[in-house]
Image (tube, rainbow, N blue to C red):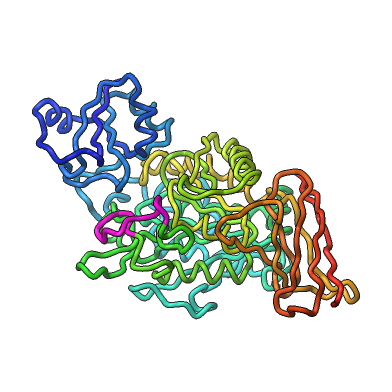
């Protein structure tokens, strides 16, 4: 294998003629982490140059690896390296999509080619809510939680899907978000198609999908970066960040580096405002991030799935610079394997901190995963549609996954629900991760491997009213349901 590698860690130097020749004639370029480059390039002939010599450098902390043959390209894809990294000319994605066989239209369309413009994505959600009001409800999350609109005045929306959608039922709350990163155009298509199939499956009586809709409250967002998505469609198909104004005159914060948990860890985002991974001025500085945090905390989200591209993998917590204690770390990997096998994807650890899935786990103990879908940000339309179909079984498996422990904390005498803090004394968390019951119902769930665990319950809103108590619960693959009763002091 012969690869041209541009290494961020090297000193600035001039391009040698042989390398310049290869650089001008490469077939496909990828971005990989430094560790993965080392795996790829054992025994390879490589030529190294600093990223500063490249017009549009790779994501900070990564290397650019250029494949010069179809075999190299396949090997890099299998390793989960993103492709393509570079686009010679940025242009409105609306122009790119004109060559992709039109756009998807209709509320329950399937298998049609083409990418869906932002206004039509929203119209599909509106149509599902209008045509199936017992099953689908469009929620303006920004308005609901009175969080700021985006810098361009947009709101964030989710489509709630449930069998009694107008009611707040005592069921697991499942959140699926796509498109934190604007240019990852396959991800809104996954979210919209997932919503369509869930609604359609319930309406048509598909047993598998109907059970998901009946037993969960599912929230789907086709984008969490509406400003960036609009900019991709109308101006720059390579735009990744949101559209916030930075102090140096540049635009954009990487929303998936702006969440509070791990914002200042060593594998967090960049402090350079022009970087593709710029993490913002402070943890949770962005309207989009604040809105997600408010929603996840209020709903006490039980499961959270975040779609990105590309890499064909399912990623588990935490990133290398943070510590997920055992046995949870191993269990996260095991369940990632279950989900990824449905898509014929591979399993990898999370790349970084400051991201949404780690923050969701930190705030609510949610079963949280990220999937890097496909092999490029904007594959041809036919390939995009094939990838959507490849991904959906994994999304279904995630939604349908039985939480190993679930139940309620209640008053021992009256059965009334108790808002309580839940800790696991036998597992040594390092960062103060929180788990609570749902305030109005006392419900909770715990993502634990099969086995017996000690659970400590302390009433939150009424300190001193109830005696704290430890319980032993048995986590199981099929899910164990328990009722934990606290007695008054």
Along the line of sight, the residue nearer the viewer: 288 or 141:
288
Q: Residue furthest right?
A: 413
Residue 296: percent from the left, percent from the top? 57, 66
Residue 311 is situated, as x and y percent measured from the top left of the image, at: 43, 40
Q: Is residue 161 above or below residue 49?
A: below
**Residue at point 41%, 76% (across, down):** 149
Quarter the C terminus occupies: bottom right
Q: Position of residue 438 (x, y in %)?
A: 70, 69
In the rendered image, residue 127, in percent from the top left (x then y), is placed at 53, 66
- Relative placement, left or right, of 448 versus 175 is right
**In this rendering, position of residue 332 left or right of residue 309:** right
Classify 41 as above or below 179: above
Residue at 33% x, 25% y is 41
Quadrant of the rendered structure where residue 151 is? bottom left
Identify the residue at horizontal 63%, vertical 52% (top origin).
428
What span is colored magenta in the figure? Answer: 265-278
Q: Is residue 115 left or right of residue 335?
A: left
Q: Residue at x 27, y 55 (%)?
A: 275
The dominant secondary structure in magenta is loop
Q: Quadrant of residue 413?
A: bottom right
> Is residue 152 visible from the viewing direction of this image?
yes
Horizontally, is 350 left or right of 185 in the view?
A: right
Check residue 342 for magenta coloring: no
């Amino acid at each position: 294998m012969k690869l041209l590698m541009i290494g961020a860690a090297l000193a600035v130097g001039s391009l040698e003629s042989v390398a310049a020749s290869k650089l001008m004639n490469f077939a496909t370029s990828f971005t990989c982490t430094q560790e993965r480059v080392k795996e790829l390039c054992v025994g390879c002939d490589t030529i190294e140059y600093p990223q500063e010599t490249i017009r549009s450098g790779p994501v900070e902390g990564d290397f650019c690896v250029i494949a010069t043959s179809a075999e190299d390209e396949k090997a890099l894809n299998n390793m989960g390296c993103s492709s393509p990294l570079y686009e010679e000319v940025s242009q409105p994605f609306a122009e790119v999509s004109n060559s992709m066989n039109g756009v998807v239209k209709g509320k329950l369309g399937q298998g049609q080619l083409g990418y869906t413009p932002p206004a039509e994505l929203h119209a599909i959600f509106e149509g599902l809510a209008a045509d199936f009001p017992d099953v689908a409800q469009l929620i303006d999350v920004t308005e609901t939680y009175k969080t700021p609109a985006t810098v361009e005045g947009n709101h964030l929306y989710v489509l709630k899907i449930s069998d009694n959608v107008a009611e707040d039922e005592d069921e697991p709350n499942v959140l699926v978000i796509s498109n934190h990163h604007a240019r990852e155009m396959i991800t809104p298509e996954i979210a919209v198609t997932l919503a369509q199939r869930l609604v359609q499956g319930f309406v048509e009586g598909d047993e598998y999908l109907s059970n998901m809709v009946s037993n969960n409250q599912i929230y789907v967002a086709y984008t969490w970066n509406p400003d960036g998505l609009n900019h991709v469609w109308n101006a720059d198909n390579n735009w990744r960040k949101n559209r916030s104004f930075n102090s140096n005159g540049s635009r954009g914060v990487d929303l998936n580096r702006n969440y509070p948990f791990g914002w200042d860890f060593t594998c967090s985002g960049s402090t350079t405002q022009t970087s593709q991974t710029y993490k913002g001025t402070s943890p949770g500085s962005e309207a989009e991030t604040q809105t997600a945090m408010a929603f996840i905390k209020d709903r006490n989200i039980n499961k959270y799935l975040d779609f990105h591209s590309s890499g064909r993998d399912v990623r588990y917590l935490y990133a290398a610079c943070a510590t997920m204690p055992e046995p949870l770390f191993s269990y996260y990997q095991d369940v990632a394997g279950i989900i990824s096998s449905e898509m014929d994807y591979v399993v990898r650890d999370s790349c970084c901190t400051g991201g949404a899935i780690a923050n969701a786990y930190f705030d609510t103990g949610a079963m949280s995963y990220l999937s890097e879908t496909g092999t490029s940000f904007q594959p041809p339309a036919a390939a995009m549609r094939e990838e959507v179909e490849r991904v959906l079984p994994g999304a279904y498996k995630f939604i349908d996954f039985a939480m190993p422990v679930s139940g309620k904390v209640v008053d021992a005498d009256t059965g009334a629900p108790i808002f309580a803090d839940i800790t696991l004394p036998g597992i040594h968390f390092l960062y103060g991760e929180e788990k609570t019951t749902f305030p109005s119902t006392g419900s909770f769930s715990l993502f634990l491997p099969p086995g017996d665990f000690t659970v400590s319950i302390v009433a939150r809103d009424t300190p001193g009213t109830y005696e704290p108590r430890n319980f032993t619960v048995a986590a199981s693959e099929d899910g164990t349901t328990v009722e934990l009763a606290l007695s008054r002091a």
